[in-house]
Every structure is written in C-alpha cells, then in structure tokens.
Image (tube, rainbow, N blue to C red):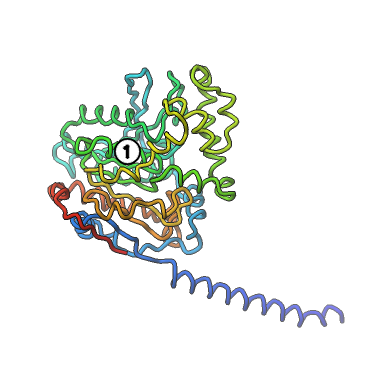
Amino acid sequence: MLSSSLSPQNGTWTELLFQLLILGLALYLGYYWARVPQRPQLVTGSRFLAFLEQHCPITVETFYPTLWCFEGRLQTIFRALLQPRLLVPYWSEVLQTPDGGQLLLDWAGQYDGSQYPDPATQPIVLLLPGIIGSSQETCVLHLVDQALRDGYRAVVFNKRGCRGEELPTHRTFCASNTEDLETVMNHIKHRYSQAPLLAVGISLGGVLVLNHLARMGPAAGLVAALTISACWDSFETTSSLETPLNTLLFNQRLTAGLCQIVDRNRKVMEKVVDVDFVMQARTIRQFDERYTAVAFGYKDCVAYYQAASPGTKVGAIQIPVLCLNAADDPFSPVHALPLQAAKQSPHVALLVTAQGGHIGFLEGLLPWKHCYMSRLFHQYAKAIFQHPTELLGLGASSPSGGGKS
C-alpha cells in the first residue's frame, strides 16, 4: 500500500523534472541562436579589406561556435582535449646559431608535381607554435596536415628547449627576440630561394612573427603572415592570466612547463640565473622576472614586456598579415587589441570573433571534425599564393581604413 501510494507522487516529480529540462534546453538553444553566432569583425585598410573579402570569404561569414562549448575558457580547454592527434611524417634538421645554440626544424611534405610543376617554386609554410608548444601540438599537426593537403611544404620552427632537447647555452626564447626566427628564415630562403614563404604564428609564435615583421619592415622575407591568438600587450596578458580562475586553469600549468625547460638544462642555466629561485615561480610574470628578463639582458620585466608587445608596432609592419583573435580570449583581452591602428594600416588585418577562446575556435556540433583555424588557413594561404600581384599595391592604400562586423 505504501509503495503504491508514492508512485503517483514520484511520477509527478519525474514529469515536472522532465518539463524543467525541456524548458532549460529551449532557453539555452534560444540564447545560443539569438546571441552566439556572429560575423567576425574584420578591421584593416581598404585595399587589404577588399582582397580578403574577395579571396578569403570565411573572414566575412558567420562563425558558429560549438553549441555546447562556446565560452572562451571552455573553447581553450576542449580544443586541446578533443582535437585528434594526426600522424605527420616529419624529418628533422638541426641548425647552429651564432651564439652557439641549436634550433630544431621539423619538415613535412614531398614534391609531387601535381599542383606546382617547378619544385623550386613550391610554396613553403613556416609554423611557429605557442609558448611551450612544438611540432607535436595538435593544432600545429592539423595546420601542417592542411598545408600538405593543399600541396605546400611545411616546416615547424621549434623554439629552443621545446622539443625536449638538451640546450648547449643558457638561452631559450622570449617574445621580443627574433634572432632565432631570422636564422631560420635565412636558412629556408637560402635553400629555396624562389619559393614563396608564408609564416603562421600561434600564440607566442604569433608575437614573434609580428615583432619580426615590425623590426624588418619590407625586408621581412615573407610574402605574408597569419597569426592565431597572438597576444598584443604583454602587460594585459599577464594581468588576465593572473585572475584566480585563469591562474588555476592556465597560468600555473604554463609556468610549470617553462620551469621544466630551465630545470632540465640546469647546468648551463645556473651560469646566468638562480635556478632554484626560478623554479619557485608560480606565474609567467614571476618566471619572466627571474629568468627571461635576466637571460636576455633586460633591466626588469617591465622593460621586457614593453619590448615584447607588438600592439605598439602596427605602423612598422609592411608585409600583409592576417591576425585571428577572439574577443573572449582569456590570454588576450579584447580591449588590448590594436583596432584603431589596424584600421589605419594597409598591411595589418585584425579578424576578431566574438567567441573562440585562446587557440580554440571550435565549431560545429562535433568539433573534432571541424576546425575554423584550418579553414581560415586554407583560404588565406590559397589567396596569398595564387594572387601575389594583388598584394603589391597594398602600401598604396588610402590612409582611411575600413572594417566590417
């Protein structure tokens, strides 16, 4: 009797719970379709804007972030978890640097003659991974795979120490120093002097590309560049990463990775820095104060961050570069993006999506099957390599810029 008397009540609660779930799902879907999918904001000079709209239509199409994972931190985390690890057949090459260091390049791709009759002119894509990333990072593997499918050669520049190799000197890398990048580019241009070269920089790799472009001007040695989630202001980046949740999710892990590189090469490091003091760092700012600024000759971390921030150097860039950023990037706040400078620049284009996080940009219901970054790279590289003459007149663009959102 007791069991039967409770059954109707249990059924009522089950029905009510089901109705609440349906209502919640309906509200969630309604919010998503009303607020989340948006066309990205594209900001650059008028001629570069017209070039991208014509040859790179993804830059003006609505971006549909993954329905169940569109918040910036979730995009950042789930991209690393969900994106499958592709098998890329690399072959490695070691370069010697003037200061006695070594650089590791991972090459991929063989000439097949189907798309480019002359192997000497087969386009090359140079990829620069993020802060502690390497050629084995999933996002790098996907971009390399896309480059190979498009018929290009690909080469990944692994920053010193990021592939687990032993370092012969105390220097690793920093965002402001582009000497190693210049060594790599000179090597590539010497070997393939007639091949057009496109640089793709991810996160800190993008910062290196931007600082190289600003430093070298028209002599940068590239036909164009693409950056993904580059951090434009080092002060704003470290401040954002030091908020409690970002510290827990990102800052501590990245700092631990940086400290591992120093600890693994303790013998050469202890000649210049206090390794035990460096190993106590718990944030990227602390690591930069104790290692990066010291190892690269800066007075302090403030001086290093001033030199490392490309946001103040937009006007010096004279090679076309498309920069993909997300407004909800936990590493690079949207207010730090140099939108006004890009609007006046004939060579720098900012493509800002409302969602995407940091190197996330997951799209579609099943994000492991869709990659906004790869689609953007495919269209942009094709436009650059197939329409090079249209890029020559960008510098003649009128001062008044353009933008679409």
Q: Is residue 85 left or right of residue 378?
A: right
Kindly identify the residue that appears in the image at 30 percent across and 37 percent down.
126
Q: Is residue 75 left or right of residue 113?
A: right
- In percent of width and height, residue 169 lies at 43, 19
Please identify the quadrant where the C terminus is shown. Answer: bottom left
Q: Is residue 341 above or below residue 206?
A: below
Q: Position of residue 177 (x, y in %)?
A: 36, 31
How many numbered dots are placed on residues in this image? Answer: 1
Element on which disc 1 rests: helix
Q: Residue at x 21, y 58 (%)?
A: 400
Q: Which residue is mark 1?
A: 211
Left or right of 117 in this view: 140: right
Q: Quadrant of residue 364?
A: bottom left
Q: Residue at x 37, y 39 (%)?
A: 205
Amino acid type of the residue tagged 1 in the rendering? Asn
Q: Work out whether 266 lies above or below 188.
A: above
